[in-house]
Image (tube, coloured by chain):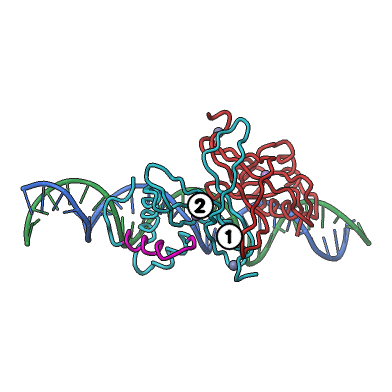
Chain colours: A cyan, B red, C blue, D green
Amino acid sequence: MGVIRKTKSVETLLAIFEQNKDAVSAVQLVDLLKDQMNKTTIYRVLERLESDGLVHSFMGKDGLKWYATCHGCSSAQHIDIHPHFQCQHCGKVDCLSVDMKIPSIPNRKINFSQILLIGECESCS
Amino acid sequence: MGVIRKTKSVETLLAIFEQNKDAVSAVQLVDLLKDQMNKTTIYRVLERLESDGLVHSFMGKDGLKWYATCHGCSSAQHIDIHPHFQCQHCGKVDCLSVDMKIPSIPNRKINFSQILLIGECESCS
DNA sequence: TTACTTTTGCAACTAAGTTGCAGTAAGAAA
DNA sequence: TTTCTTACTGCAACTTAGTTGCAAAAGTAA
Ligand SMILES: [Mn+2]
Ligand SMILES: [Mn+2]
Ligand SMILES: [Zn+2]
Ligand SMILES: [Zn+2]
């Protein structure tokens, strides 16, 4: 179930995603907003935003959950699937708008993919 | 630093990887071996096996760490990089021996990748 | 066997994320 | 505007994966 009421928490989180090109980890958000809202609320709002197709989530290289704005998705379908890049050095993550071909694998039905490219970002190399 | 002594724990874990085609999660190993060795030992042996190039590790869709046998790697270099498949239904993970092209991304140096294809395995579909 | 050093077990800890529940506040209805 | 319903939030306690420090145990070479 997605967002039904435009609460302060929802507005706050949406504003962060709007002005942020990069992906943001749940941990970063909890830290950033620790004076404004409870971490439980953050996790729960993120869940709702995702099920509404407003953001997407994926796992970073260290097993943390990351979120970023979706483009063209809705509660009905998540179509904005793309690879992500994480810097080994500073940990930053971005969405990549490249199109990677997913091969079909015998005897398996592939529904989606999580592609994480790991290396060094511009400011760290 | 890798394995120096052939201990019982090392032998046990290596035996599991030898007879196992699929990947195994650290959690599964801890559960499987709970009567034979301490979980700390398991995590530490896995670390050593990985730095010796005998196994490789990656994150599954739920943020758990998975391990599988390496082919042709050594402590000097991990060359056996390949996509993995995880079943949404039963959670099982396999190594895929397909070759996926990693695109080069402007302003970023890509060192390696974690490609996880998610869907339904043969027995679940 | 002895001596040296790696490896292990244990217990306590850390950190990310979850759950249950009582209280608060959107927003529709009156 | 006030009332009413129920989605949403805060809090505290919990769960679970993985880590750390240290003392004891077990490889290995001499
Ligand atoms: Mn993205
Ligand atoms: Mn593999
Ligand atoms: Zn960087
Ligand atoms: Zn399956």
**Residue C5: x and y, percent?**
80, 63
Q: Which residue is mark 2?
A: A58
Q: CA distance from mark 1 to mark 2?
A: 12 Å
Looking at the image, residue B34 lies above or below residue A59: above
Upstream in sequence: badge 1 or badge 2: 2
Is the CB of mark 2 within 8 Å of ligand 1?
yes
Q: Residues within 10 Å of mark 1 (few under 14, many from 20)?
A: many
Which dot marks residue A86?
1
The span picked out in magenta is: A9-23
* Dot 1 amino acid type: Gln
The verdict on residue A61 being magenta is no
**Residue A95: x and y, percent?**
52, 57
* Dot 2 amino acid type: Phe
The residue at the point 75 percent across, 60 percent down is: B1
Indicate left or right for B93 with B45 as reference. Answer: left
Which dot marks residue A119?
none
In terms of depth relative to the viewer, which is nearer, A96 or A87? A96
Residue A6 sits in which quadrant? bottom left
Q: Secondary structure at mark 1?
A: strand
Q: Chain of mark 1?
A: A
Query: How many labels sit on residues?
Result: 2
Q: Chain of mark 2?
A: A
In terms of depth relative to the viewer, which is nearer, B86 or D21? B86
The residue at the point 65 percent across, 69 percent down is: A125
In terms of depth relative to the viewer, which is nearer, B73 or A71? A71
Disc 1 with disc 2 on a shared chain: yes
Is the CB of mark 1 within 8 Å of ligand 3?
no
The residue at the point 64 percent across, 39 percent down is: B94
The residue at the point 65 percent across, 41 percent down is: B23
The verdict on residue A21 being magenta is yes
Q: Secondary structure at mark 2?
A: strand
Indicate left or right for D13 with A92 as reference. Answer: left
